[in-house]
Amino acid sequence: MKALVLERVGELSLRDIDLPQEMGPDDVRIRLHTVGVCGSDVHYYTHGRIGDFVVNEPMVLGHEAAGTVIEVGANVTHLQPGDRVCMEPGIPDPKSRASRLGLYNVDPAVTFWATPPVHGVLVPETVHPASFTYKLPDNVSFAEGAMVEPFAVGMQAATRARITPGDTAVVTGCGTIGIMVALAALAGGCSRVLISDLSETKLKLAETYDGITGVNLREQNLVEAVNTATDGWGADIVFECSGAAAAVRDLFKVVRPGGTIVLVGLPPEPVPMDIAAACSRECRIETVFRYANVFDRALALIAAGKVDLKPLVSGTFSFEQSIAAFERAAEARPEDVKLQIIVDGEGN
Ligand SMILES: [Zn+2]
């Protein structure tokens, strides 16, 4: 089967590879249609590792995927061949202690597409558990279906924040995940979102959505901008999506007394935090790792028109152009939010 394979750091090839394709009774076989290029895929391409996950052997990339069911296992009742679907890329052990607690995203035994040594889905076909495969509503496109995975991180952040209707939120970092978090926060009841970044291009893109105001850190101090917007009270919720030490340092100057901090961005190294400032405001601090039980809710919001992810697709490539798609993603152009690859444009 032809796949986009990361051979080693900096070397991709589109070539045949043997992948297990056996179906179990609880599985579905899916013909892939659209697969998004994620920052993590690009990082494995450019650095060969993320934390403790190291690419030691050739690995197929891709985990943000939508496609069409072409075969269902004997026990599968909620899907049938021809259904358009998107897939949750992490497969936990359903019997694990974390799964039984509903925290399957932090199950140490989870296998996750395109995380070494697990192959991803930049391939024509894959087999996946039906219980982690979600039918796309008729008005949700394959492109939107493949955006559910990154949006799910925003959904998880909004859920962990426990938003009260009308809350003012701040999002630090206007990358793909920052925008996803901002959109989920608005859909979850926030009245407005201030989003900060150093890139005017990224902020302008985010500001095309109603309710989002950009704060350009080259021109404005975030603490001052939030104080001005909230009469000196602070934001109800601050979502940290940059992973930048400077943003983490100032979090507790931005949040209101009794407010909530949600840590989403992953700093590459440990960063200092002002615990005394956090204590004096009695902040609640939440953390986010991937997501659990949000894919169906994300699809419901998209289908209802409450969240529009379509403007965030910045470029679409054919399967044959996959390597070019990754080279473009590695350039990290500020105007690129999400690049996608059409694995199979026909027959779907
Ligand atoms: Zn991703």
Image (cartoon, rainbow, N blue to C red):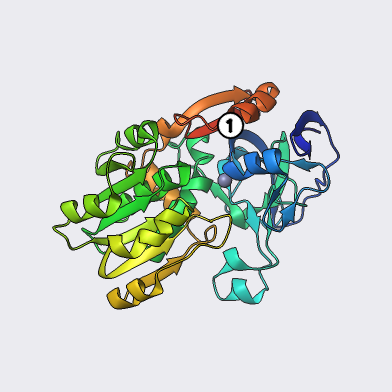
Q: Is the distance from the Cβ of mark 1 to the nearest ligand 1 atom less than 8 Å?
A: no
Residue in front for this viewpoint, 281 or 212: 281
Lateral position of residue 43 relative to residue 135, left or right: right
Identified at 34% across, 77% down, the residue is 279
Work out whether residue 121 can be spotted.
no
The x, y position of residue 43, in whole percent, is: 64, 42
Identified at 77% across, 50% down, the residue is 23
**Residue at the farthest left position:** 231
Residue in front for this viewpoint, 288 or 19: 288
The x, y position of residue 177, in whole percent, is: 46, 47
Please tell me whether residue 20 is drawn above or below residue 333 in the rendered image: below
Please tell me whether residue 245 is drawn above or below residue 180 in the rendered image: below
Q: Quadrant of the N terminus?
A: top right
Residue in front for this viewpoint, 171 or 132: 171
The x, y position of residue 15, in whole percent, is: 81, 29
Lateral position of residue 182 relative to residue 317, left or right: left
Q: Residues within 10 Å of mark 1 (few under 14, many from 20)?
A: many
Identified at 72% across, 55% down, the residue is 53
Residue designated by label 1: 329
| Number of numbered labels in the structure image | 1
Identified at 45% across, 42% down, the residue is 175
Secondary structure of the residue carrying numbered label 1: helix
Q: Quadrant of the C terminus?
A: top right
- The amino acid on which the numbered mark 1 sits, given as a three-letter code, is Ala
Residue in front for this viewpoint, 248 or 77: 248
The x, y position of residue 181, in whole percent, is: 40, 50
Work out whether residue 225 can be spotted.
yes
